[in-house]
Image (cartoon, rainbow, N blue to C red):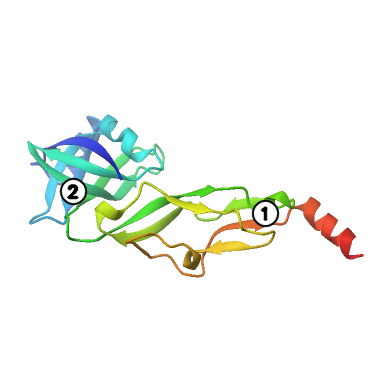
Amino acid sequence: MKTFELNGTARADFGKKAAKTLRADKKVPCVLYGGEANVNFIVEASDLRKLIYTPEVYLVNLTIDGKTVKAIVKEMQFHPLTEDVLHMDFLEVLDNKPIAVEIPVHLTGLAEGVKAGGKLSLEMRKLRVKGLYNDVPERIVIDVTNVALGKKIQVADVAVENLQVLNAKNAVVAQVKLTRAARGAQAAANK
């Protein structure tokens, strides 16, 4: 898993008025959960851009007033109109405690169904997995070479080493759909 460096400052003022003042100064109020005690802190909004607006999943090296902890992004809240970050929650990561995160899916290979005139469709861009953070990969790679026309790959068909996939077993990850041209060719062949 890739790492991301983020610096924060402990927060002393709480409440709506204090949060509004922080946001006006381009700062984002945050909370770190999972440690001995919850830690309230603030970060610069500009420092979060590369962490938020990417499909990648990062392990965050979070430095708050000189103390560094490893964490993952738990939740984000955005303004409904401006899409500015209003609040972020982080979860502290421990070496011996499993975490649940969403990992991007990457398809490789040329599917047999695509060669036959179908269209490959990625239905789930991310899969939710649970395991120790050392075992979590940057992405889940799925080979689609053997997927025929009209066939699909479900979550039950995906195995990730040392991790448990938490999505529904019958959910479709990727499939090769029939195109109009393929349907027309198939109808003409059946006549």
Which of labels 2 and 1 is toward the front?
A: 1
Residue 4 in percent (x, y) is at: 26, 37
Q: Which mark is residue 98?
A: none
Q: Front-most of 16 and 144?
A: 144
On the image, numbered disc 2 is attached to which residue?
31
Task: Name the residue rendered at 31%, 47% in the picture.
Answer: 76
Say what amino acid the circle numbered 2 marks: Val
Q: Residue furthest right?
A: 191
Residue 41 in percent (x, y) is at: 14, 42
Say what amino acid the circle numbered 1 marks: Glu
Q: Is residue 84 left or right of residue 26?
A: right
- Tell me the SS state at disc 1: helix
Q: Is residue 13 left or right of residue 104?
A: left
Quadrant in which residue 16 is drawn = top left
Q: Is residue 34 left or right of residue 118?
A: left
- Tell me the SS state at disc 2: strand
Within 10 Å of disc 2 (Cα), the crowding (few <14, some 14-19, many 20+) is: some
Q: Front-most of 153 and 23?
A: 153
Task: Name the residue rendered at 22%, 29% in the picture.
Answer: 25
Quadrant in which residue 48 is drawn = top left
Quadrant in which residue 81 is drawn = top left
Q: Earlier in the sequence, mark 2 or mark 1?
A: 2
Q: Is residue 89 visible?
A: no
Task: Name the residue rendered at 74%, 53% in the picture.
Answer: 116
Q: Is residue 67 left or right of residue 107?
A: left
Q: CA distance from mark 2 to mark 1?
A: 48 Å
Residue 14 in percent (x, y) is at: 13, 45
Residue 91 in percent (x, y) is at: 21, 53
On the image, numbered disc 1 is attached to which residue?
112
Q: Quadrant of the C terminus?
A: bottom right
Q: Quadrant of the N terminus?
A: top left
Within 10 Å of disc 1 (Cα), the crowding (few <14, some 14-19, many 20+) is: some
